[in-house]
Image (tube, rainbow, N blue to C red):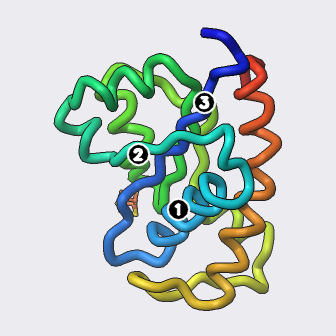
Amino acid sequence: MDNAKRRVVVLPCSGIGKAYGALSREIAYELAERVRPEKIAMTCLPLLVINDPDAVRLVKENPVITIDGCPRECAKKSLEAAGGEASHACQTIKFFMAHKDLKPEGVTQLNEAGLKLAKLAAEELAQTVDRLAAGEKQ
Ligand code: SF4
């Protein structure tokens, strides 16, 4: 694929009922809406689970970053079950471990610390997005 047209797919887990799952979605929104809107594509995780052809094509034709809220790694495993492979996989706890003053709380709406942590995490992931969008392998 022409690198100029390449998008990086960000795939957060659904994370219902868990602050670290809510954090995974918030990081993805930060990347897609504020940090790298011109380079990011997103799809719903359940579309991969039901083998939706457009969603499967998207993750097979573009590099994918999975963001999971816990060690169960639902986003990474759903991607693999659909025949894709993560170019970069991360769990949100890693961002908290690097910024322990920002403890995410809340499941439908993250607290202020969680929102700040999502912004920082998205900015940290931006370099990975840039490398993948340029065609580099991780
Ligand atoms: S990875 Fe963890 S937080 Fe995310 S959807 Fe799966 S069980 Fe929930």
- In the image, residue 129 sits, relative to residue 57, either above or below, namely below
Give the crowd class for mark 3: few <14, some 14-19, many >=20 residues within 10 Å. many
Q: Is mark 2 within 8 Å of ligand 1?
A: yes
53 with respect to 117 (left or right): left
The answer to which image quadrant residue 91 occupies is bottom right
The residue nearer to you, when weighing 77 against 30, is 30
The residue nearer to you, when weighing 68 against 41, is 41
Tell me where residue 104 appears, x and y as whole percent. Answer: 59, 82
Tell me where residue 81 appears, x and y as whole percent. Answer: 30, 28
The residue nearer to you, when weighing 45 against 30, is 30
Residue position marked by numbered label 1 in the rendering:
24
Q: CA distance from mark 3 to mark 2?
A: 18 Å
Dot placed on the residue nearer the N-terminal end, 1 or 3: 3
Q: Residue at x 68, y 86 (%)?
A: 113
Residue position marked by numbered label 2 in the rendering:
75
100 with respect to 107 (left or right): right
At label 3, the amino acid type is: Arg
Q: Is mark 1 within 8 Å of ligand 1?
A: yes
**Do the residues bearing badges 1 and 2 touch, measured as CB atoms within 8 Å?**
yes
At label 1, the amino acid type is: Ser
Looking at the image, in which quadrant does ligand 1 appear? bottom left
- In the image, residue 84 sits, relative to residue 21, either above or below, namely above
Secondary-structure class at tag 1? helix
* Nearest-to-viewer mark from 1 and 3: 3
The answer to which image quadrant residue 53 occupies is top left
Q: CA distance from mark 1 to mark 2?
A: 10 Å
Residue position marked by numbered label 3 in the rendering:
7
What is the total number of numbered labels drawn onto the structure image?
Answer: 3
8 with respect to 47 (left or right): right
At label 2, the amino acid type is: Ala
Secondary-structure class at tag 2? helix
The answer to which image quadrant residue 99 occupies is bottom right
